[in-house]
Image (tube, rainbow, N blue to C red):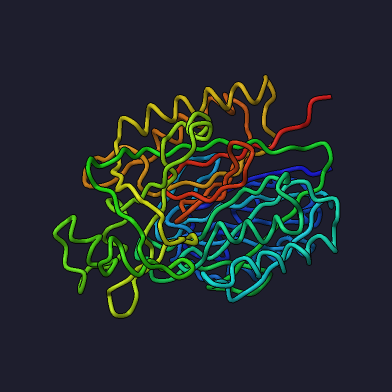
Amino acid sequence: MLEFHSGSSSAVNSKAAIEECIDHALGDRDKADCKLLVIHSTVGHNFAQMAAGAQEACPNAEIIGCTGSGVIGREGVSEAMRAMAVMAVTGDEFAVAAADGLNGSNSAQLGERAAAEMKAENPDVNMIYVLSAGLDLSGDQVIAGIESVFGEEVPIFGATAADNGKAKGTFQFHGQDVLEQGLILVGFSDPGLEVLSGVHHGSIPVEGAVFEVTKSEDNRIIELDGKPAWPALLERFGLPPETTDPSETLPITGLGEALTEDEQTVYDNPQILRVPIKVSDDRQSFYLPTSVPEGTKFQLMQRDEQYIFDGVERLMQRMKDDLEGRRPVAVFHADCMARGRHMFNRVLKDEIIAKMQYPLCGEEVVPWLGVYGYSEYCRFAGKNQFHSYTTSLFPIVRREG
């Protein structure tokens, strides 16, 4: 039977930070019983020291993880340059598979390969946790590759990695290896557990701002409305394409793709969002973290603070209904760095995190691990989906009966 334990640390020394995280998570338990250690870290830590410290403290654990723009634990949020949080798992009902070299054109193949490796090790997997690189991938194709092995009914949840908002490089951890184009899958197979999912973004359409993709290749948008894509998008904001990087436009260039009416009701949003995360060397085209067929229409979206907070309240009500009185045994969490209260030239996140944690946990200690990544894997309307700009929550609960 799987059991989950979480902890976080603000220690600056990377070895001390991972040791403190593990101590907070496992307390007086025998650390040799930890079989899986999931680490989220901001980019200021020394990853080699962190991984070595993790293996020393938990010698029997599979070590995985990724970087983010911040980490979220049961103790709250930290966006310091050196912040760390972990989920320590005891029990044997899981399998891990990893692949390197992920990009927008091979995402389905790597997803299928890693999934096949994992299924060969454990054919009883009933939910799949994904951590992947965040800058060059087609997340929808990662999902398609996994589903080609496990089918569409197995829920997929997780996040892409991030850096400190610069969109220069993201990192994934597998054992003692630090990857930059990694794909990591964890398949849980405890038959007594199931994962729920809830998702919401807080963006509204910009009136009259609709683009059509007239030329594309995999996850690269080459033309919008017959014009070079990056200049055409930035023209809307009066920004120079020659000197403007995607990291500077993350809060304002959300692109919404229309959902069906049934999907809109469950999603609580008319559009699912995509984020321009990388620009070509010639500054004429840009990349999304999903595949983009020609003919796709995108609605420009803008962040709306009231919509964010109102949406979280509706999200938590839906989550409460799904829980049916059950208390989660653990919560995994993928979130967007732009969600929260904008004050003092910063987006403050503690308030919005409290609005999620208290309804799920109350006064009880519930293991919680979250990351501020660039995109999210989250199921809704009976389908595994890939999103950006969302809060995505994944409570793991005991099955009824």
- In this picture, is 2 found above or below 137? above
For image coordinates 63% across by 75% down, the residue present is: 177
Quarter the N terminus occupies: top right
Coordinates of residue 344 in the picture (x, y in percent): 21, 43
Coordinates of residue 390 in the picture (x, y in percent): 45, 43
The number of discs equals 0
Q: Can residue 48 be seen in this view?
A: no
Whether residue 231 sits left or right of residue 12 in the image: it is left
Q: Is residue 61 visible?
A: yes
Whether residue 247 sits left or right of residue 35 in the image: it is left
- In this picture, is 189 found above or below 40? above
Coordinates of residue 210 in the picture (x, y in percent): 28, 49
For image coordinates 39% across by 71% down, the residue present is: 168
Res 270 → quadrant: top left
Whether residue 13 sits left or right of residue 305 in the image: it is right
Query: Which residue is more in the foreground, 2 or 134?
Result: 134
Quarter the C terminus occupies: top right
Query: Which residue is more in the foreground, 128 or 49?
Result: 128
Query: Which residue is more in the foreground, 197 or 325?
Result: 197
Q: Residue furthest bottom?
A: 282
Q: Residue furthest left?
A: 238
For image coordinates 78% across by 58% down, the residue present is: 95
Whether residue 356 sits left or right of residue 238 in the image: it is right
For image coordinates 62% across by 48% down, the residue present is: 157
Res 175 → quadrant: bottom right
Coordinates of residue 239 in the picture (x, y in percent): 16, 62
